[in-house]
Amino acid sequence: MGITAGEAPEDRDLGEVAPAWLLVAALAVVVGLSLASIGVDLAIGHQTAVRTAQLVDDSLRSVALADDLRYQAHRLSAGPLDRKELMAIAAQIAGDAHDYDPIATGPGERTEWSTLQLLFGRLEQDSAETGSIAPLVEAIEQSIARLVEINRREAEADKAAIDALHRRGLVADAAIGAVTIALAIGLGVVLVRSLRRQRRLVRRHVAAIDERSRELEAFAGRVAHDLRGPLAPIVTCAELLKRPGADVAALTGRIHHSAERMTSLIDDLLALSVAGRIPAGRGDVATVVREVLDDLGPDLGDAEVKLAITDCATACTPSVLAQLVRNVVGNAIKYRGADRPLQVSIDARPCPAAPEPAAGKPHDDARVVEIVVTDNGVGMTHEAAARAFDPFYRASTTSRIPGHGLGLAIVKRTVDAMGGDCRLTSAPNQGTRVTLHLPAAR
C-alpha cells in the first residue's frame, strides 16, 4: 500500500480572517442606521410639535372669536342701541371677521363663514332700520354653532393625522431598530469568529515557531556532525603527510575526496538556505526537463525515461525549476533498484488546481502546473515516506548510498515558498512517485 508524505498543514490561508474593510463597512452601516433612527425621531417630533402648536392656536382663536361674535350678536338683540353703540359693535364684528378669515380653511368652513358674514351684514342693517333682529340672531348662533362643529371635526382630523404620524414614526423606529440590532449581532458574530480564528492562527504560528526552533537546534547539531565527517579524514591525512615516507598520492587523494564531500554538503546547505527566496520568472517545463536530463545523462546510463509534457510554464526562473527537477530525478537515480533497469517517467501538464489539496493549503482559481516524477526504485517504508521532506533525514536502509538527506528538503522548501505543494507516494520495492504543483506563469 502506498504512503503519502508532505501533507503537513501550513497556515497560509489568512483569508479565513474577516477582511478589515468588511468589518468597518458593517460598523459604518450600524452607526448610519442609528443616526438615521435618531434623525427620524427628531423629524417626526418636530413635525408633530409644529402641527400640534398650530392646531392648538387655531382652535383657541376659533373658540375665542366664535364666543365674541356670539356676544356681539346678543348685544344687538338686547334692545335699542344708539348709533355710536351700533358703530362700536360693527367695528368689533369687522375686527373678529378680519381675524377669523385666515383660519377659516377647513372643509365647508369657508362657505359657512361667508354665510355668517352675510347674516352679520343683514343684522347691522335690520338693527339700524327696524330693530327686529331676533330671527337673525338665532340664525347667527346656529351658523356659529356649525362653525364650532366644523372646527371640532377639523381638530379631530388633525389629531388623527398626528396620531398617524406617530404610528409611522414608531414603525420606522422599530424597523430601523430591528435592522440595526440584526446588523450589530451579525457584526458581533463576525468579530467573535474573526478573533477566534486569529487566536487559532496565532497558536498555530507559535507552535510552528517552536517546532522550527527545535528543528533549527537539531539542524545545527546535524550540520556540525556532517561537517566533521569529511573534516576528520582531512586532518588525519594532513598529519600523516608530515611523517617521512608517507604515501603522498594516496593521502592527497583521500583529502581531495573528503574536500569534495564537504563542498557538496556546503552547496546543499546553501541551496537549502536560499530555497525560501524565489525570484519571479518564467520556466518552460519541456525545455528545462530536457536540459536537466542531458546534464544527468551519464548518471542515467541505460535508464528508460518516458516524457509526457504538454506546453506549460511555471512562475519561477528556469534555474529554480531545474533545481527542483534535478533533485527529484537525482533521487530516482540514486535510489534505483539493483536488480532491474531504472525506469523514470516525467509528466507535466497545466490544470485548474491541484486535486485534493494538502490540508491548510487550498489553491485559488489560478491555473497550476502539475509535474509528476515516477520511478521503479527501491521505494520507502511508511516511516521513511512520512519524513522524506525532513532536512538530513535518511532511511536506515539507504545509509550505504552517498548523500546528505537535503535534496527533497530543498524541493519542499522551494515549492512552499512559491505557494505550491509537493507530495510523495511510495512503497518498498515498488518505486516512488513525487508530485509537484507549481503556480503557472501568467
Image (spheres, rainbow, N blue to C red):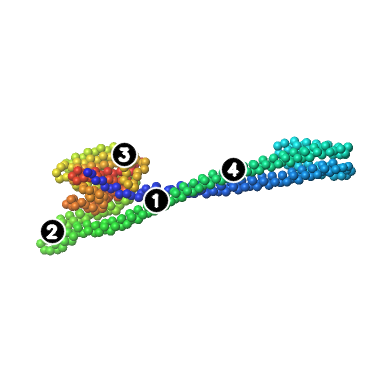
Residue 248 at what x, y percent from top left?
13, 58
Instruction: Nearest to the eye among marks 2 and 4: give it.
Output: 4
First-in-chain label (4 vs 1): 4
Q: Amino acid at mark 4?
A: Arg
Q: Amino acid at mark 3?
A: Pro
Depth order, front residue of 426/338: 426
Depth order, front residue of 137/189: 137
Residue beneath label 1, please?
A: 197
Residue 185 at what x, y percent from top left?
47, 48
First-in-chain label (2 vs 4): 4
Q: Quadrant of residue 130?
A: top right
Residue beneath label 3, please?
A: 350
Residue 105 at what x, y percent from top left?
72, 39
Q: Quadrant of residue 227?
A: bottom left
Q: Amino acid at mark 2?
A: Val
Label 2 packing within 10 angstroms: few (<14), some (14-19), many (20+): some
Q: Which secondary structure lies at badge 1?
A: helix
First-in-chain label (2 vs 1): 1
Residue beneath label 4, please?
A: 168
Label 1 packing within 10 angstroms: few (<14), some (14-19), many (20+): some
Considering every residue shown, the one lying at the far left of the view is 245
First-in-chain label (2 vs 3): 2
How far is the residue under mark 1 from the one under mark 3? 33 Å
First-in-chain label (1 vs 3): 1
Q: Which secondary structure lies at badge 4?
A: helix
Are the residues tagged 4 and 3 within 8 Å (C-beta)? no
How far is the residue under mark 4 from the one under mark 3? 62 Å
